Image (spheres, rainbow, N blue to C red):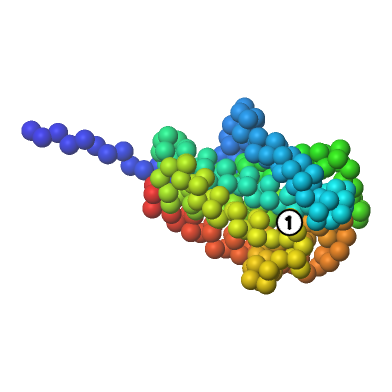
Amino acid sequence: MTLTAERTPPAQVEHRPFGLARHSLALARRSLIKTMRTPEQLLDVTIQPVIFVVVFVYLLGGAVAGSTHEYLQLLLPAIMVQTTLLGGMATGVNLNTDIDKGVFDRFRSLPIGRSAPLIGSVLGDLIRYVVAVASLMLFGSLLGFRVETDLVSALAAGLLVILFAFCASWAFVLVGMLVRTPGAVQGIAFVVLFPLTFGTSMIAPAETLPSWLRSWVEINPVTHAMDASRGLLIGGPVAGPVLWTLLWSALFVVVFAPLAVRAYRRRA
């Protein structure tokens, strides 16, 4: 007689009001606890931006702006955007690592929404953006950076930068679902992020750039986020850059979030 192994049926999702939201928040708490227990994971949003600020301000400040203080005022709001975007890369790397280690196999056996692990990881990594913004503002104030608008505008700048990075992180989630190794996720993310963050007015005014590069800078979504951050922190045009930043943020979520969930389901 041939014995046939009985297959365990997949876990059924329990349909309760706001079930996906509750499951996502529970997994976000797991991601947050993991980050807090390994604080060295936050080095990329604490030490790295400090190095960028010091190098750029004291090597280029005098040549670009005439003084290190004036350059610090222009640079720090842009570095804030760059740092949070680089921090979002860790979301894709961590998700890819969890899948490689079989953690998501356990999630699939639970009666939760299939997209809950992705949403939970993205929400849990919000702490990275908060730490990045807070540490940069603290270090910048020690160097002499001063908010030239008001407290409400400064808080709005921090929230806008966090929102933009949160929405853009879905692109890294998609990469984490498509490639095989965490190293590949990091490599692809760097290739994408460098032209996006350095092809802006972060280091030098757009007017001083070649025409071909200036054309890219003007349509670059990261440029709009940096201009919005500057306008809210040190003054200048605000309405246009903020509107463009919000539109780009919505576009990132609409395009990349469904693609990431679809890629996860196929991989699962």
Q: Residue furthest left?
A: 1
Q: Is residue 74 above or below residue 134?
A: below
**Residue 90 appears in the figure:** yes
Which quarter of the rendering shows the N terminus?
A: top left
Residue 65 lies in quadrant: bottom right
Residue 120 lies in quadrant: top right
The residue at the point 71 percent across, 52 percent down is 81
Q: For mark 1, give the secondary structure.
A: loop
Q: Is residue 172 above or below residue 139?
A: below
Label 1 neighbourhood size at 10 Å, few (<14), some (14-19), many (20+)? many
The residue at the point 73 percent across, 50 percent down is 79
Q: Residue 7: x percent and y percent?
A: 27, 39
The residue at the point 33 percent across, 42 percent down is 9
Q: Residue 53: x percent and y percent?
A: 76, 44
Q: Which residue is mark 1?
A: 202
Q: Residue furthest top?
A: 37
Amino acid under disc 1: Met
Residue nearest the observer in this picture, 174 or 74: 74
Q: Residue 14: x percent and y percent?
A: 48, 45
Q: Residue 10: x percent and y percent?
A: 36, 43
Describe residue 93's horizontal placement relative to residue 46 as left or right.
Answer: left
**Residue 20 appears in the figure:** no
Residue nearest the observer in this picture, 8 or 201: 201
Residue nearest the observer in this picture, 36 or 207: 207
Q: Residue furthest front?
A: 63
Describe residue 239's horizontal placement relative to residue 98 as left or right.
Answer: right
